[in-house]
């Protein structure tokens, strides 16, 4: 397994790496199918955990605002489709969650990194959000995301970039 690190995060202005991942319903999604749209691609560690639930619910609650800005929200974690289905149903999520149990997109986007908790090192997802422009380039990146105020910040940057 590749040992990803923050040096492998994709820089602003670079082409967003292609991916093909299944959603909570088993439907395949490719980045290319969102060409011409803004994409908020957020990576999170695990379904039904406190921080990830707060983040997902904040995206859910702001979904109309993303819609007004013609932006699609896609959440990605290493959880499988079944876990995503339970998470979506339990939290009434109104956007797509993509399953990446093999860490393919997680590694391409540099978010599968060595982490440390209580002195124990392990591999996991570092909470990161990418904003991809309609041409498929990284327009903005948020590293080591703190859930509080993250979604209003994403909306603000999205609006700013669209009006630039």
Image (spheres, helix red, strand yellow):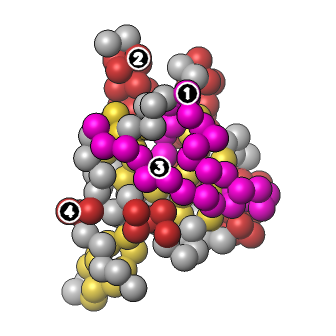
Q: Which of 2 and 94 is in front in this view?
A: 2
User: Magenta includes 80?
Assistant: no
Of helix, strand and loop, which one carries label 1? loop
Q: Which residue is drawn at 54% across and 57% down?
A: 19
- Foreground mark, 3 or 4, reads 4
Q: Is residue 163 left or right of residue 19?
A: left
Residue 128 position in % (x across, y down): 37, 53
Q: Are marks 1 and 4 in contact (CB under 8 Å)?
A: no
Q: Which of 72 and 151 is in front in this view?
A: 72
Q: Distance between the residues labelled 2 and 3?
A: 19 Å
Q: How far apart are marks 3 and 1 (CA)?
A: 19 Å
Numbered label attached to residue 7: 4
Q: In which quarter of the image is the N terminus?
A: bottom left
Q: In which quarter of the image is the C terminus?
A: top left
**Mark 4 Cα-neighbour bin, 10 Å: few <14, some 14–19, many ≥20:** few
Numbered label attached to residue 70: none
Residue 73 position in % (x across, y down): 56, 39
Q: Distance between the residues labelled 1 and 2?
A: 13 Å
Q: In this view, does 149 lie to the left or right of 31?
A: left
**Residue on which disc 1 sits:** 36
* Magenta-highlighted residues: 13-41
Numbered label attached to residue 42: 3
Q: Which of marks 3 and 1 is nearer the N terminus?
A: 1
- Foreground mark, 1 or 2, reads 1
Splitting the image into 4 quarters, where does residue 15 fall?
A: top left
Of helix, strand and loop, which one carries label 2? helix
**Residue on which disc 2 sits:** 162
Of helix, strand and loop, which one carries label 4? helix
In the displayed structure, 104 sits above or below 35; it is: below
């Amino acid at each position: 397994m590749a040992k990803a690190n923050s040096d492998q995060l994709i820089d602003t202005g670079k082409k967003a790496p292609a991916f093909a991942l299944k959603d909570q319903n088993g439907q395949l999604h490719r980045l290319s199918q969102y060409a011409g749209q803004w994409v908020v691609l957020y990576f999170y560690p695990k379904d039904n955990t406190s921080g990830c639930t707060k983040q997902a619910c904040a995206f859910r609650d702001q979904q109309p605002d993303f819609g007004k800005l013609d932006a699609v929200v896609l959440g990605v974690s290493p959880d499988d489709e079944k876990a995503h289905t339970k998470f979506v149903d339990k939290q009434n999520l109104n956007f797509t969650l993509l399953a990446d149990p093999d860490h393919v997109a997680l590694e391409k986007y540099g978010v599968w990194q060595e982490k440390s908790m209580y002195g124990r090192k392990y591999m996991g997802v570092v909470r990161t959000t990418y904003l991809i422009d309609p041409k498929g380039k990284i327009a903005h990146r948020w590293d080591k995301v703190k859930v509080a105020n993250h979604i209003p910040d994403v909306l603000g940057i999205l609006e700013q970039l669209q009006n630039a």
